Image: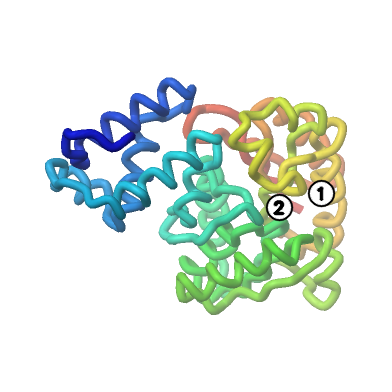
Amino acid sequence: MSADDETWTLRRVLRWTASFFEQKGIENPRLDAELLIAGAQGVDRVRLYMELDKPLSPDELTAIRAHVKRRAQNEPVAYILGQKAFWNLDLAVDARVLVPRPDTERLVELALSRLKPMAAPIVVDVGTGSGCVALAIAKDRPDAQVHAVDLSAEALAVARVNAERNAVTNVVFHEGDLLTSLADVTELDLIVSNPPYIASAEVDRLMVDVRAFEPRLALDGGADGLAVIRRLVDQAARRLAPGGGLLFEIGFDQGPAAHALCAAQFHAVAVHSDYAGHDRVVEATL
């Protein structure tokens, strides 16, 4: 994207950037180009396509180049833009938290379905990160008392920003390890979690976008990926109200092992698939 005699329009920059990303091996070159150029312009993708023949000023080209350079180094698009849409939320995200994934919306969907018949339920989100799950549940159920827990004070700072950003007021944030910081909160109706579930040896084999930029604390689930889940299942079995539920996300190949862990302490266990048909969420009822 160097200076030359031909005018740089949005159309030309978009075409060049998509081609450049493809050469770099970026997974979604066209989509990432659209998102980053629209973000640099301060518009959405629809508006971008309405203005494809717009000539760009030197300052606008500089802003776009900065985004392109960061993505070429594999930094996630969400971190470059500083935001990510999730459920019905507009979330601030940066390297202190995982980028919320569409698969995790399945966790929210199942949680809200389970909560539907309950009045004023008490819900805990363990490992809240950006707050995506806790805030999605709390926004949909303003009568719920939602507690969001994370071991990382930095992650909680992001989650608090997101609560204010999305005008969600029925969430209390706690710094601590799993349920240990909630000694005064008893008879829980539902515990939800997107815990670290990737085996330690596999973390360094993840896509560079993930392993080099996203927080390892939120990824590394120990030798077999189930270290945190084992502790969560054990603590949840002792803290839930009778008939209460535990919902947590897992890796696509962890369904049988996670089911077995829960079956030892819970009355009923089910493994739910994500939108692609892979095992994704375990539901256990006390």
Question: In the rendering, which numbered label is found on residue 270?
Answer: none
User: Which residue occupies 81% across, 51% down?
Assistant: 232
**Mark 2 nearby-residue class (10 Å; few <14, some 14–19, many ≥20):** many
Q: Evaluate whether residue 59 shows in this view.
A: yes
Which of 195 and 61 lies nearest the eye of the viewer? 61
Question: From the viewer's perspective, is residue 79 above or below residue 152?
Answer: above
Q: Residue at x 84, y 31 (%)?
A: 224
| Quarter of the N terminus within the rendering | top left
Instruction: Point out residue 96 in the picture as x, y percentages from the top left corner.
Output: 66, 56
Query: Which residue sits at x=62%, y=52%?
Result: 95
Helix, strand or loop at disc 1?
Answer: helix
Q: Residue 233 carries which label?
A: 1
Which residue is nearer to you in this view: 212 or 256?
Answer: 212
Report whether 49 appears left or right of 45.
left
* Mark 2–mark 1 distance (CA, rounded to whole Å): 8 Å
Q: Which of the 4 image quarters holds residue 222?
A: top right
For the residue carrying disc 1, how many other residues have a C-alpha within 10 Å: few (<14), some (14-19), or many (20+)? Answer: many
Instruction: Specify which label sits upstream in the sequence, 2 or 1.
Output: 1
On the image, the x and y values in percent for residue 257 come to 79, 30
Q: Nearer the viewer, residue 126 or 184?
A: 126
Coordinates of residue 261 in the picture (x, y in percent): 83, 38
* Circle 2: residue type: Leu
- Could you say whether the residue bearing mark 2 is in a helix, strand or loop? strand
In the rendered picture of this protein, how many numbered marks are placed on residues? 2
* Residue 145 horizontal/vertical position (percent): 62, 75
Question: Can residue 86 be seen in the rendering of this structure?
Answer: no
- Amino acid beneath label 1: Val
The reply, left or right, for residue 220 in relation to residue 16 is: right
Label disc, if present, on residue 246 of the rendered structure:
2
Is the C-beta separation of discs 2 and 1 under 8 Å?
Answer: yes
